[in-house]
Amino acid sequence: MEKTPSACAMQWSIDLEKSLRSNKPGKSTEAILRIGPRLEWWNRVSNLHAAEYKIFGLIPGEDKLLANAILLRLTDAFKSGDKHMKICIVKIFLSELKQRRQLRSEGRKDEGILSKDKLDSYSELLTRIKIVFDSGDVEERALSLGLFGCWAHIAKDSADVRYLILSSLVSINILEAKASLFAAGCFSELADDFAYVFLEMLGGLLTSSGTSKAIRLAGGRAFAKMWCSILLADRAHKTGVKLILESSEEEFSLVMLVSLSKIASKWTPLLPRQMDLLSSFMTKDRGLSLQAMALKCLRFILAKGMYHVPGNSNVTLKLFGVINQSDFPPALRFDALRALCKILPSNLDTIPCTEILTIFSKILQIVEFKIQSPIISERLFAIHVLASIFDKLLGILKDAAGGIGSTVSSHMLTFIIDRISQLIKLVVVNPHPDKGAEQEDQKIIM
């Protein structure tokens, strides 16, 4: 049977200790970078069965002792090592944090080897990092804050750590302030009471005329973490909407659109408000970058399948507006079509048949254009759109023929289906516009 991480941990701990004591240049940092993927592997399979203890000759609880030993060695190295070593340690735990979030999104509740119930020494770990923060220079304080953020799940209840993070938000040094925003965002994901305090401070920070652009952008990204509870998410979303509507900075608005979409995607009741916000940015006066970002955020929400957009909603009308703007970049109009085709198939049953003809005549115009596109992905998507619409309309036509719809409605739908059939024939007859365009596709794919 292949060894598990717990069975390997003894050797890992010994190797790490030897390398950290080595005088050979680069040996210690190599060992630190090597232990990172090993810890991530251990996180994925951190729980041992009784049989595994017997097979590998482990004493129950030995794996916890080894995990504590490895992490204490790393914090000792962070405390006594040079800045390069500190940076390497922060990097491995940033990667571990990313993995842990991914596991959490997949339904994993256990925090792996870095959970409080497996770390008897977690308070000692925090104390050693705090020593670096208290005695270090600006860069070392920023690295300490980054590590506290990575360890938010074991540090979120520490009053001392909370205080130093919140007090660092107003640091005059950009590096330290940005690191505190990162750490505060990590804490806000897990601690509702901390998040409320942070939100109040963040609102004041972002409206202050003395706040630099770099901090405003970092603060905008931190907004995305304010979703621990529905009440917090609601307040954060309202605050964020106010900030974005009052801002004249395009870059800040781009960041806030993403953050507010992430908050809304966590709680269905917030989605109608977010949809209204996104649709308000799908107008020509907002500029192409903001329109493109609003469309990207809309597709992000639709992809999660959490919200049913009415077929005759303001969002739908704005999407048609983008599609019909011939002076807009093709990529922007294509993104609008993608979003629209995500909305409409599930809404056709609710749209009056008298409106279907108008709606799909517009869609068919751009689909017909895209079928002639030299870009393979656009042609394939156009065919996909035709297939989706064709399938849905056949169902509606069947209902109409059964007495649900009127004869006029049936004629309208038949007319649309005939047009779609003609376009499908066009695809079959001429699947490749020209060889030159096909070669261009290959360059794009490469």
Image (tube, helix red, strand yellow):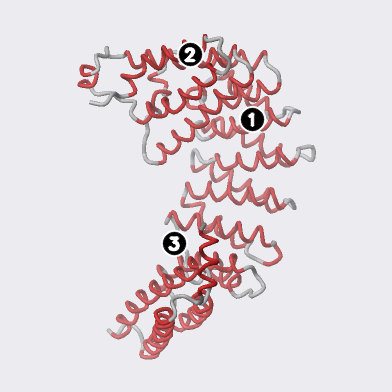
Amino acid type of the residue that numbered disc 2 sits on in the rendered structure: Leu
Above or below: residue 156 compared with residue 278: above
**Which one is in front in this view, the residue at disc 1 or the one at disc 3?**
1
Q: Give the quadrant of residue 289.
A: bottom right
As drawn, is 325 to the left or to the right of 18? right
Q: Position of residue 220 (x, y in %)?
A: 64, 43
Q: Residues within 10 Å of mark 2 (few under 14, many from 20)?
A: some
Q: Secondary structure at mark 1?
A: helix
Above or below: residue 32 compared with residue 249: above
- Residue on which disc 2 sits: 72
Number of numbered discs = 3
Q: Secondary structure at mark 2?
A: helix
Q: Position of residue 19 (x, y in %)?
A: 49, 13
Q: Position of residue 355 (x, y in %)?
A: 48, 81
**Which one is in front in this view, the residue at disc 2 or the one at disc 3?**
2
As drawn, is 68 to the left or to the right of 23? left
Find out whether the residues at labels 2 and 3 contact each other: C-beta distance under 8 Å.
Answer: no
Above or below: residue 233 compared with residue 60: below
Picture residue at 58% right of the left edge, 44% below the top: 235
- Residue on which disc 1 sits: 179
Return the disc, 2 or 3, that comes first in the chain's sequence. Answer: 2
Return the disc, 2 or 1, that comes first in the chain's sequence. Answer: 2
Q: Split into 4 quadrants, where in the image is the N terminus?
A: top left
Q: Which mark is residue 308?
A: 3
Residue 17 shows in the view: yes
Residue 256 or 330: which is nearer the viewer?
330
**Which one is in front in this view, the residue at disc 2 or the one at disc 1?**
2
C-alpha separation, residue under disc 1 versus residue under disc 3? 38 Å
Residue 56 or 341: which is nearer the viewer?
56
Q: Residues within 10 Å of mark 3 (few under 14, many from 20)?
A: few
Q: Secondary structure at mark 3?
A: loop
Find out whether the residues at labels 2 and 1 contact each other: C-beta distance under 8 Å.
Answer: no
